[in-house]
Image (cartoon, coloured by chain):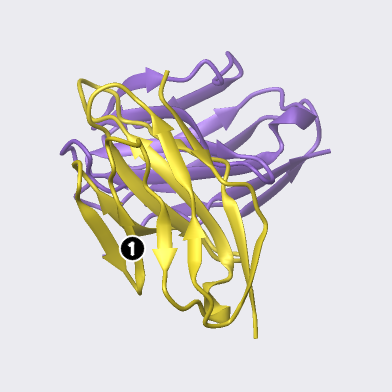
Amino acid sequence: DTGVSQNPRHKITKRGQNVTFRCDPISEHNRLYWYRQTLGQGPEFLTYFQNEAQLEKSRLLSDRFSAERPKGSFSTLEIQRTEQGDSAMYLCASSLMTPGETQYFGPGTRLLVL
Amino acid sequence: GNSVTQMEGPVTLSEEAFLTINCTYTATGYPSLFWYVQYPGEGLQLLLKATKADDKGSNKGFEATYRKETTSFHLEKGSVQVSDSAVYFCALHHGSGNTGKLIFGQGTTLQVKP
């Protein structure tokens, strides 16, 4: 069990640029989640996948954000035309499909938009 | 809607002191409840969980009991160590239907002094 991995760990970009983050979940986990955490706050849910299907999206996820999980394994989160307000830690988690099952988190990708 | 409220920090204790971090929730039905811990520079790790009323979760000397009558899940430890210094997050998960997300409190910073 190698755990959830995320790449890159850090990303600095200029306002208006596009960025893409990758998440590799624990291999047998069919659920994958994206959260955003700003300084001093708890993580906020963005979206989640069950296998390749995106089942829920938060209202926090503006049209500039898109997430995919094309083969039900790894996932990507893209932010287009980044804004300074997008600066945050982006967390990925995965779990089995059983209700109440533990979500295991990756180390996160810290985004800084200049 | 569903929500989690934690006591505000920071909490500063001397080594071997007793710890309580309060957590209350608002939710319909019977959510699962979690405590996650975030050590400096690291990702979120599950500390303990409880999936039904009166369950007690425990790990590494920490305990929390799911109290439906008071909608609470307070975290306790009898004797804290310097290594327990971290940010602690209470969270709930509503597993009914397709709702997969965790809802987090704002986090409570614990600092333990030698």
Amino acid type of the residue that numbered disc 1 sits on in the rendered structure: Glu
Q: Quadrant of the C terminus of chain B?
A: bottom right
Query: Badge 1 is on which residue?
Result: B63
**Residue A26, placed above or below residue B63:** above
Classify residue A106 as left or right of residue A3.
right
- Residue A103: x and y, percent? 32, 47
Which residue occupies 42% across, 57% down?
B75
Residue A105 visible? The answer is no
Which residue occupies 56% across, 48% down?
B107
Chain coloured purple in the rendered structure: A
Q: Secondary structure at mark 1?
A: strand
Q: Quadrant of the N terminus of chain B?
A: top left
Q: Quadrant of residue B102?
A: top left
| Along the line of sight, the residue nearer the viewer: B5 or A76 | B5
| Circle 1 Cα neighbour tier, 10 Å, few/some/many (<14 / 14–19 / ≥20) | many
Chain coloured yellow in the rendered structure: B
Residue B114 visible? The answer is yes
| Along the line of sight, the residue nearer the viewer: B90 or B26 | B26
